Amino acid sequence: MNAIERFGLKTLLLAGILGLSACGSTPEVDRSRIETSERTTLMDAAAKGNVDWVESRLDAGAQINAMSPDGTPLFLAAANEHDAVVWTLLRQGADPDRGRPDGTTPLMAAASVGYERIVDMLLTAGADIEARNDNGDTALSYAVLNSQLVVTKRLLRAGADVNVVNEAGESLLMRVVARNDLLLAGVIVDADANVGYESPNGRTALDIASANGNQDLVMMLRNARD
């Protein structure tokens, strides 16, 4: 049984990340923007899920928030579903919002693969649930558009904005409807999505459903609008 299983994730994160230990020795989060054009050995260790190697590189002074085009160590650990590495990096001061150069965050990576445990870790560590990348996508966008129902509901419970609009002016509901995803469209509508939102070109989710000939979606959207 590991420490996470023995004591519980939230207890350990609160003690480790928020500095509630008696000794007060928890490192502060380093939010400096340390840029790098190369992938580091710490990134490799994080991507492979090797906790011992991660700790060894950190002890040797590796920059925990270094960023390559592939992302930070935390981003790579989250994207590859290595929860033990994510926990280790967060306890050592990794910035929970620093991911890839395009603004894609570790929370977005975890949401896209549907790893609820890592999503919980990052939220507990203070990750910005409304952070957007260069395309205007949020963690909720990634969960929904990758059909991750459980994480979608988790993020909505945490207060994620269901009416997020991307850089193209498309609402999340419009994008789900365009995929003919009745289940997730229903979840989005039930979370009070703006069914009547019009994109810059004047289209609505109902217009998209009608154009696709999806009568189930058309009926659901009409009922939600009325």
Image: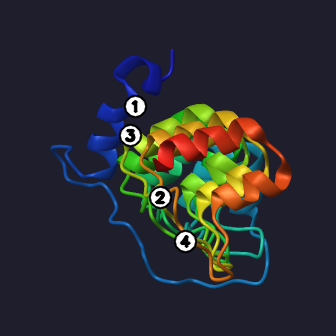
Q: Nearer the viewer, mark 1 or mark 2?
A: 2
The image position of residue 188, as x and y in percent, is: 53, 45
* Pointers 3 and 1 in contact (C-beta within 8 Å): no
Q: Residue at x 43, y 53 (%)?
A: 160
Number of the label disc, if any, that sits on residue 132:
4
Q: N-terminal of the two: label 3 or label 1?
A: 1
Q: N-terminal of the two: label 2 or label 3?
A: 3
* Pointers 4 and 1 in contact (C-beta within 8 Å): no
Residue indicated by mark 3 = 157
Q: CA distance from mark 4 to mark 2?
A: 19 Å
Q: Secondary structure at mark 1?
A: helix
Residue 200 in view of the camera: yes
- Identify which residue, 119 or 222, lies in the foreground: 222
Q: CA distance from mark 4 to mark 1?
A: 26 Å
Q: Nearer the viewer, mark 4 or mark 1?
A: 4
Q: Residue at x 45, y 20 (%)?
A: 5
Amino acid under disc 3: Arg
Q: CA distance from mark 2 to mark 3?
A: 18 Å
Residue 85 versus residue 90 in the image, above or below: above
Residue 162 versus residue 60 in the image, above or below: above
Q: CA distance from mark 3 to mark 1?
A: 18 Å
